């Protein structure tokens, strides 16, 4: 290969490398409509589940690991969602932040609002966010596993990032016609309820 042909090959390679913009350099608002296919998400979630399953001893540890993964996603999702929202304001009321999660965050994650948001009738510091798990099949030996612990971690991170410390867990509540129904239980800290009373 001659010196001139090597130089032309190297210059074409250099221009291809220069033209590519890293994902970190892209405009955050331009990627808003770019969605990941459900197949890609299912594959990625499956790999996360297998990775976590190899490093834990029991089902509770696996759910805790999924919750940790979700927490990491939730902190980044809150930052991105607030950045993209044109009329964003810091929520100071409990119902405001729950409505933000119910609508804006769920639309960013799933393309639609959450199914419903319910206040617990037994405890005033608990809210339920029911949703249905799709595309998840769990082996019989892991029948107690609730993969929505990942979503609970996302919700917990968003609440913590918005200064609403809480404990968020996922619970399976099968109903007739919805065998995989899960409730995301949000248990707010007592200081949040005291702050809410002072704002009234």
Image (cartoon, rainbow, N blue to C red):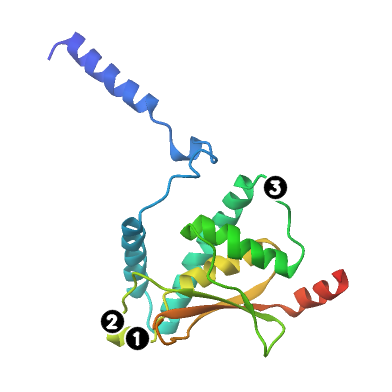
Residue, far front: 177
Q: Which residue is mark 1?
A: 143
Q: Residues within 10 Å of mark 1 (few under 14, many from 20)?
A: few
Q: Quick one: label 3 or label 1, which is nearer the N terminus?
A: 3
How many labels sit on residues?
3
Q: Quick one: label 2 or label 3, which is nearer the N terminus?
A: 3
Disc 1 is placed on an element classified as: loop
Query: Residue 96 vs residue 104: left or right?
Result: right
Q: Are marks 2 and 3 in contact (CB under 8 Å)?
A: no
Residue at x 71%, y 69% (from the top left corner): 95
The span from disc 2 to disc 3 (Cα, nearest Å) is: 44 Å
Give the x, y percent position of residue 156.
Answer: 59, 69
Give the x, y percent position of residue 143.
Answer: 34, 86
Residue at x 54%, y 65% (from the top left corner): 154
Depicted 84 relative to depicted 40: above or below? above
Q: Residues within 10 Å of mark 2 (few under 14, many from 20)?
A: few
The span from disc 2 to disc 1 (Cα, nearest Å) is: 6 Å
Between 89 and 43, the one nearer to me in the picture: 89
Residue, far bottom: 122
Query: Residue 170 vs residue 47: left or right?
Result: right
Give the x, y percent position of residue 46.
Answer: 32, 66
Residue 87 badge: 3
Q: Which residue is mark 2?
A: 139
Disc 2 is placed on an element classified as: loop
């Amino acid at each position: 290969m001659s010196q001139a042909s090597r130089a032309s090959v190297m210059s074409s390679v250099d221009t291809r490398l220069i033209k590519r913009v890293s994902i970190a350099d892209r405009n955050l608002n331009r990627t808003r409509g770019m969605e990941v296919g459900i197949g890609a998400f299912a594959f990625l979630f499956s790999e996360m589940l297998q990775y976590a399953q190899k490093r834990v001893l029991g089902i509770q540890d696996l759910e805790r690991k999924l919750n940790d993964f979700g927490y990491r996603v939730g902190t980044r999702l809150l930052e991105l969602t607030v950045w993209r929202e044109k009329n964003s304001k810091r929520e100071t009321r409990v119902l405001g932040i729950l409505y933000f999660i119910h609508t804006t965050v769920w639309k960013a994650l799933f393309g639609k609002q959450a199914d419903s948001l319910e206040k617990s009738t037994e405890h005033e510091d608990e809210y339920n966010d029911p949703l249905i798990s799709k595309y998840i099949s769990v082996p019989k030996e892991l029948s107690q596993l609730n993969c929505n612990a990942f979503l609970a971690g996302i919700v917990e991170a968003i609440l913590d990032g918005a200064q609403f410390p809480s404990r968020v867990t996922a619970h399976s509540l099968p109903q007739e016609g919805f065998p995989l129904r899960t409730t995301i239980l949000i248990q707010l800290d007592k200081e949040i309820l005291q702050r809410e009373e002072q704002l009234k």
